[in-house]
Image: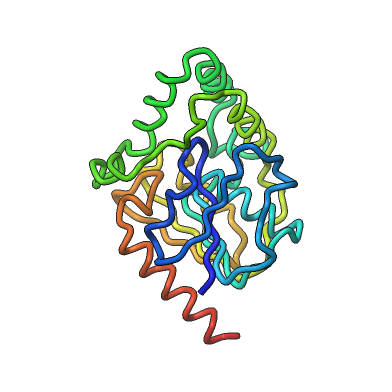
Amino acid sequence: MKVVALSGWTQAPESLSQLFDAVTSIDYATHEPSHIPMPAECDLLIGWSLGGVLARQLLVSKQIKATALITLASPVQFVRSDQFYPAMPQDTFAQFYQNYASDTQRTLRRFAGLLSKGDSHADAVREGMQLHATAEQPEIWLPWLAHLEAQTHAEAHPQLPTLHIHGEEDAIVPVEQTEALPDWVTVERWAGCAHAPHFHDPARVRQSIQQFYNEVACRA
């Protein structure tokens, strides 16, 4: 099974590599969203948070073809608007953007705290997290925050089998966003889990993905 993975904002590309024996981790940091080097196809395309947003966009634009899509804690819309309320308030996002630009290390520490906030396996989440080598270079990662700001709930979703796993304690992307996902998306909402399901319980994530993929293969 060919697995391709896209990690979260400022997180190491290999953040999802523990889920399967062989994972192609895409390091998109220094590329444009429309020009991310991708293989032509895969069996599973997995995206965590921002990586899930990018995975959807890459599939819609036909930059990659996949049998199934897995998204972990990925937003339907990251920043709140009049048309979409369950998201980060605009003033909170603007302050975070400015803080990351002006006090990068401190902001990354606070962001790490948000990733594990409320998680019943917070120690495991903190232990699993690894920053991207360029995380302390705002000039690389601020454009990706701007990309998230521009994202809206009206964006097209790829019409292929999709599993979305979202922690009910997520302090970054409210779990209520799962209600806005298309009806063909299979949703798992996990109690006691925050923004990193694959660090919260990697064995459970692996099992959910494998079971979902087996069902997709049986229907094919």
Residue at the limit of the structure toward the top, as seen here: 102
**In the visual, does 128 lie left or right of 8?**
left
Is 32 rendered above or below residue 88? below
**In the visual, does 117 lie left or right of 90?**
left
Viewer-side residue, 188 vs 82: 188
Which of the colour schemes (rainbow, by chain, secondary structure, one colour) is used? rainbow
Residue 175: percent from the left, percent from the top?
Answer: 45, 47
Viewer-side residue, 216 vs 192: 216
Is 89 rendered above or below residue 220? above
Q: Quadrant of the C terminus?
A: bottom right
Residue under the point 64% across and 37% down: 30
Residue 166: percent from the left, percent from the top?
Answer: 43, 52
Residue under the point 57% across and 46% down: 27
Residue 51: percent from the left, percent from the top?
Answer: 56, 48
Residue under the point 42% across and 36% down: 131
Is 196 rendered above or below residue 188? above
Residue 194: percent from the left, percent from the top?
Answer: 36, 44
Tally of marks: 0
**In the visual, does 4 lie left or right of 170?**
right
Viewer-side residue, 49 vs 193: 49
Viewer-side residue, 177 vs 120: 120
Is 197 rendered above or below residue 204? above
Residue under the point 45% across and 65% down: 22
